[in-house]
Amino acid sequence: MQMFFLQFLNGLQLSMLIFLLAAGLTLIFGLMDILNLAHGAFFTMGAYAGWLVSRMTGSYWAALLIGPLVPFALGALLQSAVLQPLVKRGRSTHLDLALLTFGLLFATAGTVEYFFGSSFYSIPTPAILSGRIAMLGIDYPVYRLFVIGVGLGVALLLSLVIDRTLIGATLRAGVDNREMVTALGININVVFVIVFGCGAALAGFAGVIAAPIMSVYSQMGIGIVVTTFVVVVVGGLGNLKGSFYGALFVGMTDTMAQAYLPEAELFAIYVLLVGMMIFRPQGLFGSTGRVA
Amino acid sequence: MARLSVWRCLVLCAGTFIAVVRPAAANDVSPVKIGLLLPYKGVYAPLSDSIDRGFQVALAEYGGKIAGRPVEIIRADDELTPSVGVQKFNKFVQLDKVDLVAGVVSSSVAIAVSELADRGKVPMIFANAFADEITGKFCSPYVARTSFSANGFQYNSGKYWASKGIKTAVTMGPDYSAGRAFLGAFRRGFEEGGGKVVQEIWTSFQKTRDWGAALSQASNSGAQIIYAFYGGSEAVQVVKQHADFGLREKMPLIGDQWVYDEALWPALGDLAVGAKHITVHYPDIDSDANRKFVAAYREMFKEEPDVSAALGYDNGKAILLTFDKLGGKMPEDRSRFISTMRGLNFDAPRGKIRFNAQSSALLEKVYLVEIVRGADGKLKRKFIDEFAGADDLPGCTKSF
């Protein structure tokens, strides 16, 4: 039982980390219909920016606050300088954008490697979050509990912003009917840039959060983007609530498979994905109309 | 008189002509061409750079020449992919007309190109490629390996830990051929020595995001140590999360040179200090051959050589020593190059290198070291103990 509880916490921790990435990805897809494969690149950039800040200031909290600004700026730039002009020229089918952002993902890893080398770095865990807490008969690392808390906090915050604020209302309207929002006098392009930037910032934030556990290296964003995509598809494309539960599904499946059925770890989440595609292609919470 | 002088001139001129041509014919100055096949880009780029640099140190020792012939190194990137390795190997042989091919990190690339070497009768001298099968099931009279086999490295490590009072261990490693080969060898040695591997944990290679599940399992098993085989980002994550779960005192994570590679030290910070691991080489080995190598490496590249650099040096040195013995010429029957190499016995930085009957180098010593903080504040390795490497696994059915 204790063992199960321990694995449950491990699963929850992984789920929350993936959720931070999936949230940004699903927002961008939901609003702009962009399959942003470069999401992993923002994860990497956030981690490196955070690492630089933590090395200069010695503070984890400064890294957590300032780190995501770099992916925010670059994300906003990518949307306004590259993706929007493409839309104008009519080169923005799913395939065009997938290819473009897929290239960006690898180009970023290469660029990061050029500037920082292929060594491994780390952001030290802050003193207050190091160590372990004893509860229900197990010792659990404080930092992992912190990751769980942050994930839940971000989920709550995002759902409040989207459900209860004017910005959220604009966003939801944009997802449902873009032309109508434009007709109402809202500059949708500005909204797009901000949402893209925020999505990228969320990925960067996840990068800093992951750094003390995963360490920082040039290829860190490439593998995780696949897992994130599984989450977004399982949860329903463009659906925030879906991403949250999708992340829980995928994180738990991955951890429990590793713990109790290690032979299945490699493909467990893909079985989940395939099953979902067959029986509920719109995802857990996706609207029935859309088949992505 | 005039006629005579013309004759004399002709004779003299012819004499001079012959004098010029003769030494050239006897003393071939065309370059020796060596193809160096390494995964220069991607995850193993740092490793490839080290091997390449070690190779250059060996070459510099000979002044870049062997028996008067300049040595030309032609590089190609195998991208860690067997099909690309095959393509580059063919390019070396057909286009560049190399005398032999050296390098190769991945065992799967190695198995693919060793078949080409065997069919094309081109000597192939591996610098890494630790899979037991390479000089076992896939052995060839045209293939040699200057590093070591998985069994040679890990079998006696298992025996060693069993003899040091460790009765139970959990092994943990990535679920692919190298992980299975190294940890399998450890297990055989450990259980032969009276220990018991209570659990084998295999994590999916380069797919695992979080090690909490695996480490919780290990912790639950109640074994005395975790014996791990990981490299790169996976090694950093395992070592860090192992410490996060408070297992450092309860169940130490023991591994090899790759788990605690110096490239990972910046990310590990203080976690590296006090870690014990086995290795085939470290810069402070107390021998003339090693001091000479380390000094030359520092001089050329302004940094400390890592294990891969030492293996690259061994690769280059073995090739050059063999050429030296053959008077700088590739024999007509090119398997003679490999059989000559097989007869070598030389002092390398890691200890004496000699080869077994399948042309695979053996480890004279495996070192147990501890990472400590030196007086200058930098991390370094401290010698604790040493033991001999094991023999390779049998499996070669050819005779040569």
Image (cartoon, coloured by chain):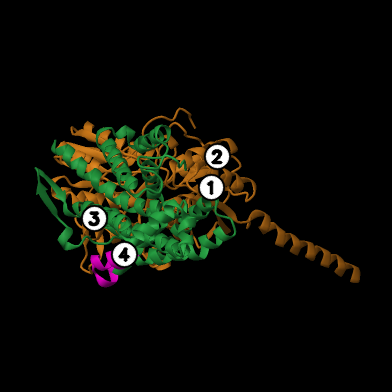
Chain colours: A green, B orange
Asked whether the beta carbons under mark 2 and mark 1 sit within 8 Å of each other, the answer is yes
Q: Which mark is residue A153?
A: 3
Mark 1 belongs to which subunit?
A: B
Picture quadrant of residue B206: top left
In space, the residues marked 4 and 3 are separated at their CA atoms by 23 Å
Amino acid type of the residue that numbered disc 2 sits on in the rendered structure? Ala
Amino acid type of the residue that numbered disc 1 sits on in the rendered structure? Val
A191 vs A255, nearest the viewer: A191
In space, the residues marked 4 and 1 are separated at their CA atoms by 41 Å
In space, the residues marked 3 and 1 are separated at their CA atoms by 57 Å
Q: Nearer the viewer, mark 3 or mark 2?
A: 3
Same chain for the residues under marks 3 and 1 in the image? no
Same chain for the residues under marks 4 and 3 in the image? yes
Amino acid type of the residue that numbered disc 3 sits on in the rendered structure? Gly
Picture quadrant of residue A181: bottom left
Mark 3 belongs to which subunit?
A: A
Q: Circle 4 sits in a helix, a strand or a loop, which is it?
A: helix
B147 vs B245, nearest the viewer: B245
Q: Which mark is residue B220?
A: none
Q: Is residue B257 visible?
A: no
Same chain for the residues under marks 2 and 4 in the image? no
Q: Circle 1 sits in a helix, a strand or a loop, which is it?
A: strand
Query: Would you name the residue on which mark 1 appears?
Result: B101
Query: Would you name the residue on which mark 4 appears?
Result: A51
Mark 4 belongs to which subunit?
A: A
User: Percent position (x, y) of residue B373?
Assistant: 21, 63
